[in-house]
Image: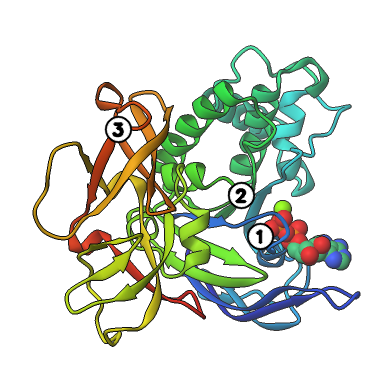
Amino acid sequence: MAGIDIEGLATVYPNGVRAVDGLDLTVADGEFFALLGPSGCGKTTLLRTIAGLESATEGTVRIDSIDVTRLEPGKRGVAMVFQDYALFPHMNVSENITYPLKVRRVAAATRASVAEKTGDELSLQGLLERRPGQLSGGQQQRVALARAIASEGKVLLLDEPLSNLDARLRLEARTFLKKLQKDLGITTVFVTHDQAEALALADRIAVMQSGKLRQLGSPREVFARPANTFVANFIGSTPMNLLPGTVGSDGVTIAGGSLPAATGSVPAGAEVTVGVRPEYLTLSTGDVSGPAVRGSVVVAENLGTQSLVTVDCDGTLIGVTVPEEDEPSPGTPVVLTASEQRVLVYDKESGEL
Ligand code: ADP
Ligand code: MG
């Protein structure tokens, strides 16, 4: 088992695109680490650079404290699962799983027992003689994982491994993957553009934008306290409210009302962007004392057990989630409140906390 240390890493393609643009991060031994960001932000390039499939232009990659920056992929001790699985169509499942062992000239009898054991771990019993074309998407995905695990790499690199599965199967595979990773205890870097997937799976998440790291933290931290408006916009299944506001003496003024906020060193009177998640706002229909924002309900959307209510507050639309049974009807006058630590104040220009 092994950690990964990345220092000052940049990967520049021949066409001049700096797909990874000066990145420092450490993945701990045994950690399930997610790389999250929009399409084109450099996730695949970073993963391929760790694997040695792209060469670093600047900086270093260490795996298990060994500098592998100039080492060929086969010597880095990494196992990678590609987005399209990259299974060999002419080989059966067993041959696919043990191909990396065959390359290393491991004896056929040993390979057969590894295929059996890994096949069991990944619920592929009874499928070992089939070819990839005779498997469902979910089964192909598990074969790709099995092949990576059977290769006994020190770290597992997964590039959007669930993205080709349909919604239901994807949730099942997600749970399966989380349990497998915990059972094996293998250091795993998981790439995804799906914030819900990253929040559900990872011990820690690195949020990337344009080849750079915008925040690194636990799912709880990046959800509850996004470090900037980019992360605030990207994380969460309902969009975070990001509203123009002004710092007051003990909070912020927004949408014709006010909310408590830890404004830190930001001077009173400063124009800021106020961030508050719909989940952290409280909606009341009666009167409320203390700082609050008042408005009337525009529309409510059913999210299952919760409803997302859009409230027009002095011309500004604010989202708030409520238990489904408390959903107010359009036109209802309502009051929104929040506790101080839930109201974040971002610099209006830089978007940073
Ligand atoms: P992601 O996986 O986050 O979608 P990628 O790592 O695939 O992002 O791509 C990052 C950037 O690098 C994009 O601008 C993409 O167009 C560019 N890119 C990716 N692969 C190549 C390549 N082989 N040659 C040139 N540019 C590339
Ligand atoms: Mg990609």
Q: Along the polypeptide, which appears first: circle 2 or circle 1?
A: 1
How many angstroms separate mark 3 from mark 2 (CA)?
Answer: 37 Å
Scheme by which the image is coloured = rainbow
User: Is residue 324 shown to the viewer in this render?
Assistant: yes
Relative horizontal placement of residue 324, taking residue 229 as reference (left or right): left
Q: Position of residue 281 (x, y in %)?
A: 27, 48
Q: Disc 2 or disc 1, which is closer to the eye?
A: 2
Q: Residues within 10 Å of mark 3 (few under 14, many from 20)?
A: few
Kindly state the secondary structure of the residue where label 2 is placed: loop
- The answer to whether the residue labelled 1 contacts the one labelled 3, judged by CB atoms less than 8 Å apart, is no
Q: Which residue is mark 2?
A: 193
Q: Quadrant of residue 225?
A: bottom left
- The answer to whether the residue labelled 2 contacts the one labelled 1, judged by CB atoms less than 8 Å apart, is yes
Q: Is mark 2 within 8 Å of ligand 1?
A: yes
Q: Amino acid at mark 2?
A: His
Depth order, front residue of 289/341:
289
Q: Position of residue 90 (x, y in %)?
A: 89, 27
How many angstroms separate mark 2 from mark 1 (CA)?
Answer: 9 Å
> Measured along the vertical axis of the image, is residue 172 above or below residue 229?
above
Q: Disc 3 or disc 2, which is closer to the eye?
A: 3
How many angstroms separate mark 1 from mark 3 (CA)?
Answer: 45 Å
Q: Along the polypeptide, which appears first: circle 1 or circle 3?
A: 1
Q: Is mark 1 within 8 Å of ligand 1?
A: yes
Give me the residue at 26% from left, 59% from top. 342
Q: Which residue is mark 3?
A: 332
**Total marks in image:** 3
> Measured along the vertical axis of the image, is residue 327 above or below residue 81?
above
Q: Disc 1 or disc 3, which is closer to the eye?
A: 3
Of all residues, the one furthest to the top in this rendering is 126
Q: Which residue is mark 1?
A: 43
